[in-house]
Amino acid sequence: MIIKNQEKTPKINDKMFGQTLQILGVKVNSTELVEVLRFVRRKITQKRKFWITTPNPEFIVAAQKDSQFKKILNSADLAIPDGQGLVLASKFLGTKPGLSERVAGSDLVCKLLEEASKENWRIGIVGARRGEREEIRELINRIKQKFPGLEIEALEQTLDWSKQKFEIVFACQGMKLQEKWIFKNFKKTNASLFMGIGGALDFLSGFSKRAPQWIRNLGLEWFWRFLTRPSHLKRILIACFYFPYLVLKEKVRS
């Protein structure tokens, strides 16, 4: 996919998120979960189009090898630090401002679904459960049971979805694929918030089990993923070893 200047998503000027820094050339915003939620509510109320990325160490590493992916990440309106490794890296590199805390994408998705069920926001999802129709239906049923009154549907199973109106669209294809889908469909989709969320809905629906809270508090969610999904070993090694190596290299260089 070739990225042209005229295709860039429109930027939102919002002083509340003026605290922006870069880690290895990738934009990250220093913020907190409560601030992000306040930002989302306001923009949806204003019917403004915007999108959120959730960079973590794996994203940062991938962006070093894929300049198009890096450009896409840096075109987002808000980039929440979804990884304790980013918080530690910002402190080690001495970036100003530093990252105040990790904002987990899964936590944000849960809060947004709670808000959507209260405010009657319509949610569209794309790319969930590898496109398996029956699994997507089961996932949606479980999500609706968890958030009563929620209006949520899969774009793949919605007739003329590009002509429908949504408050939020979640892309679930996984890193890179979901961000590239958002970049391609941002202007042609009638929605306010776009956000790539990976497997967050799998956690919320029970298809996958998330790490206990105490493990998350220690910043060891990566270790839980290794225990529960050994096939992700390569991704874990990238986040836990190659990313710190790149950060150390940057520190020495600067």
Image (cartoon, helix red, strand yellow):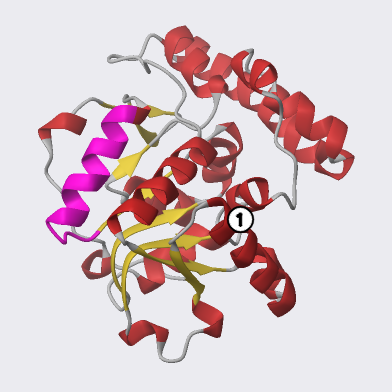
Q: Residue at x 59, y 68 (%)?
A: 127
Give the amino acid at mark 1. Gly
- Residue 61 at x, y = what percent? 59, 37
Q: Residue at x 65, y 52 (%)?
A: 205
Image quadrant of residue 225? Answer: top right
> Crowding at label 1, few (<14), some or many (≥20) Cα neighbours within 10 Å?
some
- Residue 137 at x, y = what percent? 65, 73
Q: Residue at x 60, y 53 (%)?
A: 201
- Residue 117 at x, y = what percent? 39, 55
Quick one: 142 or 93, which is closer to the camera? 142
**Mark 1 residue element:** loop
Q: Is residue 98 above or below residue 193?
A: above
Image quadrant of residue 80? Answer: top left
Quick one: 48 or 11, which is closer to the camera? 48
**Secondary structure mostly taken by the magenta-highlighted segment of the chain:** helix
Answer yes or no: is residue 165 visible: yes
Examine the structure image and report whether residue 164 is included in the region drawn in magenta: no
Q: Is residue 112 above or below residue 233?
A: below
Q: In this picture, which residue range is highlighted in magenta?
A: 34-49
89 relative position to 238: left or right: left
Task: State the quadrant of the C terminus.
Answer: top left
Q: Residue furthest bottom?
A: 159
Residue that badge 1 annotates: 174
- Residue 31 at x, y = what percent? 31, 25
Examine the structure image and report whether residue 40 is included in the region drawn in magenta: yes
Q: Is residue 107 above or below residue 241?
A: below
49 relative position to 72: left or right: left
Quick one: 76 or 190, which is closer to the camera? 190
Q: Residue at x 50, y 23 (%)?
A: 86
Image quadrant of residue 230? Answer: top right
